[in-house]
Image: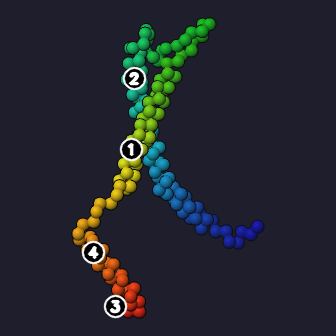
């Protein structure tokens, strides 16, 4: 294996250029923005579950303590299930929000766009019909005399 053509500086710059092309592609940047927004959305949903829904649930269901202290005791061993329950509710809320946003809302938008695209074009105005006639006459004239161009 020959190393005559190996230039470390050139290789480093080439590697840097390849990384720039990869890191700043539109898809990668879009993905990064999606992850950041998803993380923020997850924090909002987590706060909703822990601060509002689960405390309301602990008021409605008969219990002496908040949901965080809910536990089963089997043979003297405590099995806390309150946090797990909160995570399940958190997941269900995130799944429902994504379902309604992605499936219903975006589906509704794309369906409306498809319906607009599929709708018949409105009838031409008198000006548009005259312009079409002029275009067709000019086209016939050029086809009748192919050797003559202005």
Q: Earlier in the sequence, mark 4 or mark 2?
A: 2
**Residue tagged 4:** 131
**Residue tagged 3:** 150
Which numbered disc, 3 or 4, marks the residue closer to the eye?
Answer: 4
Q: CA distance from mark 2 to mark 3?
A: 78 Å
Label 1 crowd bin: few (<14), some (14–19), many (20+), radius 10 Å: few
Quarter of the picture containing the C terminus is bottom left
Q: Earlier in the sequence, mark 3 or mark 1?
A: 1
Q: Which mark is residue 129?
A: none
What is the x, y in percent for residue 28? 50, 52
Which numbered disc, 1 or 4, marks the residue closer to the eye?
Answer: 4
What is the x, y in percent for residue 108? 38, 44
**Residue tagged 2:** 53
Q: CA distance from mark 1 to mark 4?
A: 37 Å
Label 2 crowd bin: few (<14), some (14–19), many (20+), radius 10 Å: some
Q: CA distance from mark 1 to mark 2?
A: 29 Å
Q: CA distance from mark 4 to mark 2?
A: 65 Å
Instruction: Give the side of residue 148 with respect to residue 69, left or right.
Output: left
**Residue tagged 1:** 108
- Mark 4–mark 2 CB contact (< 8 Å): no
């Amino acid at each position: 294996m020959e190393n005559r053509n190996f230039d470390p500086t050139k290789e480093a710059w080439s590697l840097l250029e390849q990384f720039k092309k990869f890191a700043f592609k539109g898809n990668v940047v879009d993905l990064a923005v999606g992850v950041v927004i998803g993380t923020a959305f997850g924090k909002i949903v987590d706060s909703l579950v822990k601060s509002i829904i689960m405390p309301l649930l602990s008021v409605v269901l008969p219990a002496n303590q908040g949901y965080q202290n809910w536990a089963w005791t089997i043979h003297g061993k405590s099995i806390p299930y309150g946090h797990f329950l909160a995570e399940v509710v958190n997941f269900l809320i995130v799944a429902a929000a994504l379902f309604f946003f992605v499936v219903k809302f975006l589906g509704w938008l794309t369906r409306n766009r498809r319906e607009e695209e599929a709708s018949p074009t409105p009838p031409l105005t008198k000006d548009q019909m005259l312009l079409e006639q002029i275009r067709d006459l000019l086209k016939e004239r050029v086809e009748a005399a192919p050797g003559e161009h202005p």
